Structure formats: structure tokens, C-alpha cells
Image (tube, rainbow, N blue to C red):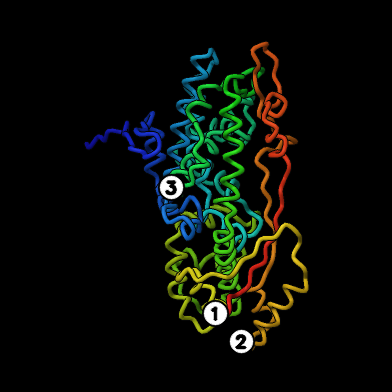
Amino acid sequence: MKVSNKLKIFNDPIYGFITIPDSLIFDLIEHKYFQRLRRISQMGMSYLVYPGAHHTRFHHALGCMHLMQKSVNVLRFKGVTISKEEEQALYIAILLHDIGHGPFSHAMEHSIVNGISHESISLLFMEKLNTEFNGSLTLAIKIFKGQYHRKFMYQLISSQFDMDRADYLKRDSFYTGVAEGNVNSERLITMLNVVNDGLVIEEKGIYSIEKFLVARRLMYWQVYLHKTGLVAEQLLTRVLKRAKELTHNNVKLEASKPLQYFLENEIENKSFGDLQLEHFSKLDDYDIISAMKAWQYHDDFVLRNLSEMIINRDLLKVKLKNKKIKKKLKTEHLNALIEKYNISEAEADYFVFDGQISNQAYQAQTENINILQKTGKIVDVIKASDQLNLKALSKPVTKYYICYPKDKM
């Protein structure tokens, strides 16, 4: 009988060696649902702006687990009781927190499935795996859903400073080369503590958390909301919408079986069951790229041009403004396109559109980042900080964009 060594080590470019803590975690990583994350890009279409941004959700999930291991060790050292079962559940919950992401991370949520978020799909995957692994994920699911009585455990997975953000800021900064996002995750984790069952940062970590919030703001403007990445993601969403529309009009499109399934069927939250999950588990970036490579030669004007734009990185022009886009400007671009190509207004809408983006680095109204002062008093980071900038970071900044074709298409 062949026995494999399940205590493997990964060599990560960010943290060095990442160890797999136990055989259950190893089996979850080996599972086809998790291996699929190797084929889902972490930053969607951002590689069209930053050529190095080809890292995957697989990288990110392992990085988050590594940071969770560090957090557990730090909190135990400071006298916080965490049982072996709770420790394993924390590792599982953070490892699988992004398992429900679709191709290019976010495009699916706004195109070929309706009203179902990647968090909901992650939970469905976890429940399915829990059945396969004889209930071993029950506690992890409870923590993931925020239903476990120890609040700080949920905060480690989802809050304004969690292991997810601690990893993706540092990782995305590394792969894009945008130094402004390079946060000191290890320093912040060393400053963690638990008071009254809530996660706090010790006062001497105040400057590190300030840097973290500023880095988050800068990364959103420079990377996540970069106008070229924004227009590329919008185009991808529209490609999938057009493909679905054509399929429903009995136009045969070349596509892989999993993608074909989602193009042919109306999938909503309530209709997303085991069958849909199985099809979804076979869908990744490669299905979309290979489909677009075929669709760029299709007879349909919209599908052909949208696919060509993404494949050849010849995107729409995009302008960002501080004020709302005037309806007149959009109408002018729409009419010019309709006249030039003799297409309908509905078809032109795929190429001329506007919208808005918002950046709020710290949401003071929801869950606070609490600072534990030397006196034992707990205060919100904004009140504890002498950095006037932080108050400004808690206010949402909204910008408006319009996209339209360049002179030639």
C-alpha cells in the first residue's frame, strides 16, 4: 500500500516556506475543487496593465493559511486559548474562503450567473466537501458563517484587518510591482491580541495599521480600480452577456461544456444546487480565453469585436471624471457608433457605457479596527491615530467613468 507524505512544504515567493499543518488540510488542497484555483487569476484582467499580475487564487489561499498559522501562534503566546479543533477549523475556513470564485475572479458574478456571490458559492463548496470528508469541516463552516461564539475567529477571516487582506495587499503589490501596497503583514500579526472576545491591535502597532490602510487606498486607485483594468473587466462581462444572449436566440457558439451549460441556463441563487456546483467546479479562466479566441471570428458584430478587443488588448477608451457623466456626451458617442457601423442602439450599448467606482479604505460605520492602549482602554484606530489622513480614508471617494470606442474599431 502506497503511503504519501502529507506534511508537504510550499516555496512561496512572498513568505518563503509554507508548511501544510495536517493531513486533512493536505487532502483539501489535493482536492479537484481546490486545485481549480490554480486556473483562476487572482486579479482578473489586471495583467493587461501589470504584466506580472498572473498569480492565482491558489497562491493567495495558501498565503492566507500561512498568515493564519502565524496568528494562531501569536495569540496562543499571548495567553489566548485556541483548541486543536479550533486551530484546524481556522486553517480550513481561510484556505477555502475564496474557493467559490469564478473565471477571472469577479466577471462571472455580473454576467452569466445572477445574484449569487462568490462567498455563497464558497459556502456551497465547503458544505459539499464537508459531506465528502465526513463532517470534518463543520466547525470551519460555523466560523466562516460568523455563527461560532468566539467572535475574534470570524474577524481573522473576515474583517477590516483579516488574513485575506493581509495577504492580498502584500501579494498583489509584489506581482504588480506597485511598491505602495507592500504592507508589513508579519509585524501587524505580531501586534494582534484578543480582548472581550474581539480582535485588537496593540498600541505599538498603530503605525503599521496606518500604513496598511493607506496602502489599501493606494492599491485600489493604482491597481484594483485602474481605468484600463476596469474597462477590460467591463468588456469581459459584456462578452459573456452577449454570448448568453446569442445562445438564448439559438445561435450556436463554440464553447467548452461547462461554459455552454452556463450560457444555456438561467442560473440564480435559488437554482444553484449540486448540479450547478459540479458544472461550476469545471469552469476556469481557460474556458473563457479559449472561447474568446474562437468568438473573435464570429459573424456577430458585438461578440466578434468585444472578443478581439480583449484578446489583442485593443480596448475601449476610458475617461475618469470627478463629476457625473453628462447624458449628452454618452448619446453623442452612441449615435456616432450607430451611424458608422449601421448597428442598433442595443448593440451600440455594448461599446458605449458609463458607471462609477468608489474607494473607501476604512469603513468606520461597520466593523472597527480597535487599538488596545497601554492603559487597557480600547479605541477605534481613527481616534487612536495622530494621522489626520485616516479620517479622510474613512470617507468614500467616488469617481465616474465613460467608455467608448477609439476612432477605429
Q: Amino acid at mark 3?
A: Tyr
Q: Amino acid at mark 1?
A: Met
Q: Which residue is mark 1?
A: 409
Q: CA distance from mark 2 to mark 3?
A: 40 Å
Q: Secondary structure at mark 1?
A: loop
Q: Which residue is mark 2?
A: 341
Which residue appears at 74% of the width and 76% of the height?
Answer: 331
Foreground: 33 or 190? 190
Give the class, few, some or many, for how many residues have Cα within 10 Å of label 3's Cα (few <14, many ≥20).
some
Tell me the quadrant of the picture where the C terminus can be found.
bottom right
Q: CA distance from mark 2 to mark 1?
A: 10 Å
Q: How many marks?
A: 3
Q: Left or right of 154: which side holds 279?
A: left
Q: Which residue is mark 3?
A: 175
Residue 193 picture quarter: top right
- Residue 338 percent location from the top left of the image: 67, 84
Residue 233 picture quarter: bottom right
Q: Along the polypeptide, which appears first: circle 2 or circle 1?
A: 2
Q: Are marks 2 and 3 in contact (CB under 8 Å)?
A: no
**Quick check: 399 above or below 387?**
below
Q: Along the polypeptide, which appears first: circle 3 or circle 1?
A: 3
